[in-house]
Image (tube, grey):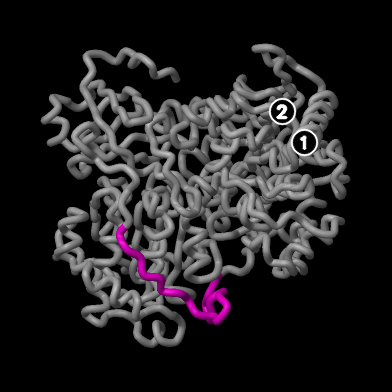
Amino acid sequence: MKTVVCPYCGFGCRLLVDPKTMKVKPHRGEPNRGKLCPKGLHATEFVLSGDRLRRPLKRTGNLLKPVSWGQAIDEIASKLLEIRELYGPDAVAFLASSKVSNEENYLLQKIARLFGTNNIDNCARLCHEASVHALKMAVGTGAQTNPYEDLERFGVILIWGYNPAETHPVVMDYIRRAKRNGARIIVVDVRKTTSMAFADYGLITRPGTDIVLANALMHVIIHEELYNEEFVKARTTGFSEIKMAVRKYTPEYAEKVTGIPADTIKEVAREFASAGSGAVMWGMGLTQHVSGVENVLAVIDLALLLGYIGERGGLYPMRGQNNVQGAAYMGALSEFLPGYVLLTDDRFRKRVASLWGVDDLPTERGLYLTELWDAIESGDVRALYIVGENPAVSEANFTRVRKALKKLDLLVVQDVFMSRTAKYAHYVLPASAFCEKDGSYMNSERRIQWSHMVCRPMGDSKPDWEILTMLGKALGLPGFDYSSVEEITAEYFRLFPELEDRSVEELKQGDGIFLPKKRLHTWEFATEDGRARLIAVEQISPWEKPDQEYPFILTTIRLISHYNTGEMTLRSPSLLKLMGEPRVLMNPDDAGRLGIRDGDWVEIETRRGKIRMRAKLGNIQRGVVAVPFHFKANRLTSDALNKAGTPEFKFSAARLRKLRSGKPTPGTPP
């Protein structure tokens, strides 16, 4: 049996795969402890799909035709160099992947920066970049603070805008164990989720009102003097501002805004404060708003008021993809070098440049992923190199993104399947799947784990690191003479002082290595003065508001059997059997008013487009509808951005109407 890292969510389960049968069993060690969800159990099925890309393809007219690897790489490199010569290095952008290894993300950002641009980003921009910004502002480090194992010993777990039972099923084993140990579980969401079945308190709030609720909880904690005065005085700054800011956010005021009874808010605040230790876990329900950074700051404030940090608590921004944490940590973000170090940090930047054999690297922030489409439309970006991402489906308001992709002088897509994005490409490069290569991945708790090659690459596909090594050489960049993936691992180890004395062999043999260490902020925070910042935030209105024309609030949700844009899960026969038909969740009163019954076909429309779907009646506040995001939902979603560059996927003004049949709505292609 070979040990691999699961290719799905950011929990980081390890799988044991039989090379002969490709059957999967759960790894007994950390972090999954013998547990797996359905996606992990059937993780190898999509690898064997007949839809796999097997040869490099080049666009000739309207057709993509096979070419040799040598021709493809030489022509791509030649076109990239020509565009740089004509328009400068910033006319080229690179999009990294949350599904490829640390080594591969490291190489792509190395290519971008040696090429002369910081236009390198990844889909962390669409999910937890708001968390990174808020965490760096408040505690100095933009990552999860504690390991999963700590959850079992905390007195309370607050789960906000996040549904672990469906998005990270294995973490529920830790949460259930915490509950058996006496922990209170509080879940805040815009609908009744599967996770609420395990909760002591399930708070269903209106979308876009998270700051009001968090400030109301803090109002009670401060007013009743339940906060940790010793911790606040010794280890934080900004308490007086918080105290003044939340005075007006009474539970009675919050009830009017959020829809949650004032008495419930008081009870939950007291429960959370009296536990003695606690975790705050959150997901896209907090970050994918124009107020995303402020939403996260508000829940960080809650934890800091009570000293729920280090040994007594933790902050858990739960990552959605198996290596989104690794992609970000390896430097595949336009404003950060590896390790979330700012581009303007001269000392570290020179350290990186020296390792790469050059004098210096560009210091101006590159384009966020969500800024690319404007830059392409204006002609500032002429070429885009995409590794393992599908923005033609995953981006908000994707109709606009598809138009931009058509405008590029050069689009290269490196992927496992002919995704919707790949159909626009000038060159498509076939990449190996997760179990067809070696490499390391970093899960949500910052645990780096080694994933072993189980089987040979299908057809003429190649591991991403090999393709990128070929590209780096063809571009004439220094330091691309790698003959094994372990050489790349050793190189990125040399960047981080915490890894300098660790070996690749040690990583391969153990249960992983935490970077920078297992538990952050135990004694001091990673800020200039060692203190955390309590940062007061006020309610920020969503970019759109419901009105007479579009009276509903549309939000998006995940489903347990699906993963992102469906390229992997829809090619898994076992998962297809588990999948129900995607439906729009509605409040029964709203449905009755519109003459809609459970199972009826409805059309959902926003100012950006419309889709059709069957209705499902359930426990969600009136005036709110929820659509699974894995399919066509991003035809509808708002591309308004927060300050971290994340779109407002979770709030759009919408309208619904009942359809007579399930026939496709005119003007809504797949």
Place residue 601 in its image quadrant: top left
Q: Amino acid at mark 2?
A: Leu
- The reply to whether dot 2 and dot 1 touch (C-beta < 8 Å) is yes
Q: Which residues are magenta?
A: 519-539
Can residue 326 be seen at all in this image of the molecule? no
Place residue 351 in its image quadrant: bottom right
Q: Residue at x 53, y 81 (%)?
A: 523
Q: Residues within 10 Å of mark 1 (few under 14, many from 20)?
A: some
Q: Is residue 588 left or right of residue 115?
A: left
In the image, residue 158 sits, relative to residue 322, either above or below, namely below
Where disc 1 sits, the SS reads helix
Please state which of residues 568 and 360 is positioned toward the viewer in this rendering.
360
Q: Is residue 652 left or right of residue 385?
A: left
Please state which of residues 400 and 22 is positioned toward the viewer in this rendering.
400
Where disc 2 sits, the SS reads strand
Inspect the magenta stretch and tell me whether residue 522 lies in it. yes
In the image, residue 543 sits, relative to residue 298, either above or below, namely above
Residue 387: x and y in percent read 66, 37
In the image, residue 158 sits, relative to residue 46, either above or below, namely below
Number of labels in the image equals: 2
Q: Where, quadrant-wise, is the N terminus in this rendering?
A: top right
Q: Residue at x 74, y 49 (%)?
A: 113
Q: Amino acid at mark 1?
A: Ile
Can residue 286 be seen at all in this image of the molecule? yes
Label ID, residue 579 = none
Q: Residue at x 22, y 31 (%)?
A: 549
Q: Is residue 235 left or right of residue 76?
A: left
Residue hosting label 1: 467
Q: CA distance from mark 2 to mark 1?
A: 8 Å
Q: Where, quadrant-wise, is the C terminus in this rendering?
A: top left
Residue hosting label 2: 429
